[in-house]
Image (cartoon, grey):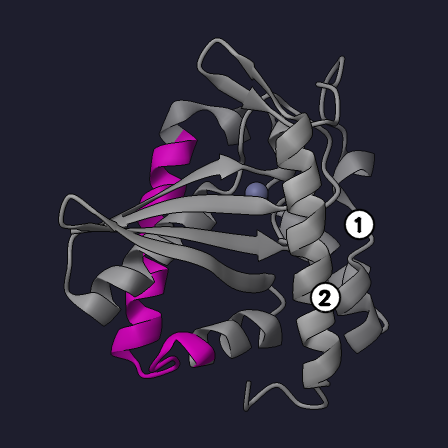
Amino acid sequence: MEGVKGLDKGKFKRVIKDYRELAADEIEMEKHVGDKLTGPRPEMDGKLELSHMIDPKRPFFTSMTSSDEKYVSTFRMGHFNTPKILSDSVRGANYVGGMEFGSNIIKQNLVNDFDDLVSFLLDYKFGILDLVDEQEINGKNILDLRVYECIECACLPNLGKPTCIFEAGMITGILTEMTKKDVSAKEVRCWTNGYSFCQFEVTLE
Ligand SMILES: [Zn+2]
């Protein structure tokens, strides 16, 4: 966790533990509607407004910096063009952009290993990265990778599907460059399908 100034490791561990418990509770309450997963927060009626996107309360990041909600709002203002933000073409472009960015983080030595990556994502306020599980199934490695207090989606309403396409691309780019394997990352749970965390199913082969 070096590189993140002033980080209290004990406090950080408690934050991770609390989020894992919250996630377990929410997964227990989730529903499958057709092939769609939906978390405990009901799907919103109407349209996403600017007021939904700005000034989110991110407890951990707020405890680190006083103006966290302003920083996150600025990041999101460039994205405020719904419904285009959820259209397929924008999603594809975001994924590829994220991959390119993620791959460059490694190529340019901003991040050298997984601990570095956790620090990088905290430092730049993307979110709190947590590798919850890693399994080998049929020669493939499957990771359960989560992001808490995500800059993209924390506190957004349930819009019926996950939103963090750029981040999924970024994870893909980073892990492809780190491992030289074929990687794909798919977000399965997100604030925008009713949860309070982001969860990516990552496959490495
Ligand atoms: Zn998300």
Q: CA distance from mark 1 to mark 2?
A: 18 Å
- Residue 16 bears which disc, if any? none
From the image, state whether disc 1 or disc 2 is nearer to you.
2
Q: Bin the neighbour count of mark 2 within 10 Å (Cα to Cα): few under 14, some 14-19, many 20 and up.
A: some
* Residue 94 among magenta residues: yes
Q: Quadrant of ligand 1?
A: top right
Q: Is residue 137 left or right of residue 77?
A: left
Q: Which residues are magenta?
A: 90-115
Q: Nearer the viewer, residue 172 or 87?
A: 172
Give me the residue at 33% from left, 82% from top.
112
Task: Mark yes or no: residue 149 visible.
Answer: no
Judging by the rendered image, the residue that carries numbered circle 1 is 56
Lower position in the chain sequence, tag 1 or tag 2: 2
Residue type at numbered disc 2:
Val
Please state the horizontal and vertical placement of residue 110, each as a whole percent of the image: 39, 81
Left or right: 57 in relation to 94: right
Q: Is residue 43 left or right of residue 186?
A: right
Q: Secondary structure at mark 2?
A: helix
Answer whether residue 199 is magenta in the image: no
- Return the residue nearer the eye: 153 or 50: 153
Q: Which label belongs to residue 15?
A: 2
Residue at position x 15%, y 65% in the image: 180
